[in-house]
Image: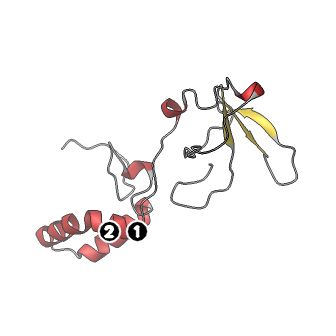
Amino acid sequence: FWGPASGTTHHVGIYIGNGNYIHAPQPGDHVRITSIKDYRPDFALRVDIAGLPRATNSLASSTILDGINDSFHFAQNQTTDQFVAKIAEDAREIGQEENIYASVMMAQAILESGSGNSLLSRSPNYNLFGIKGAYKG
């Protein structure tokens, strides 16, 4: 998928192995195979293929999923309710210590991190406010 994980997806492709994916580059264009090196997706999801018929002929020895875990970040998006439940107690404690409203802090974290779904808000960064820079401590 192309576009932010927490926003509007503007393009979709299907990974077919060997560093390639199949897609239609734009409406009305021909479907084609493109190297991931040429146009790297913003995020990816693995589709559960359990229960589908077993591949035959040219697909029987396919390498469709080879190496994909090493190339992309796979995670299921959490809902805003799940995100709020995860951060509420910490936000309350910080709000009381720093004399700021926990509700405002949580609202800003929801906005900046897409309810904790942005890559920057996940491990190892846990950056909920989109702050970029370096700090010791």
Residue at screen point 40% across, 68% down:
80
| Residue 124 falls in image quadrant | top left
Q: Quadrant of the C terminus?
A: top left
- Residue that carries the numbered disc 2 in the rendered image: 84
Q: Which of 118 and 137 is in front in this view?
A: 118
Residue at screen point 22% across, 67% down:
91
Callout 2 touching callout 1 (CB < 8 Å): yes
Measured along the vertical axis of the image, is residue 123 above or below residue 62? Answer: below
Q: Is mark 2 on a helix, strand or loop?
A: helix
Q: Which of 122 and 65 is in front in this view?
A: 65
Residue at screen point 61% across, 42% down:
41
Circle 1 Cα neighbour tier, 10 Å, few/some/many (<14 / 14–19 / ≥20): some
Q: Which amino acid, by three-letter code, is at mark 1?
A: Thr
Q: Which of 68 and 126 is in front in this view?
A: 68
**Residue 82 place in picture, x, y as percent:** 35, 66
- Residue that carries the numbered disc 1 in the rendered image: 80
What distance separates the C-alpha of mark 2 from that of mark 1?
A: 6 Å
Q: Which amino acid, by three-letter code, is at mark 2?
A: Val
| Residue 123 falls in image quadrant | top left
Q: Which of 78 and 130 is in front in this view?
A: 78
> Is 7 situated left or right of 101 in this image?
right
Q: What element carries label 1?
A: helix
Residue at screen point 29% across, 68% down:
85
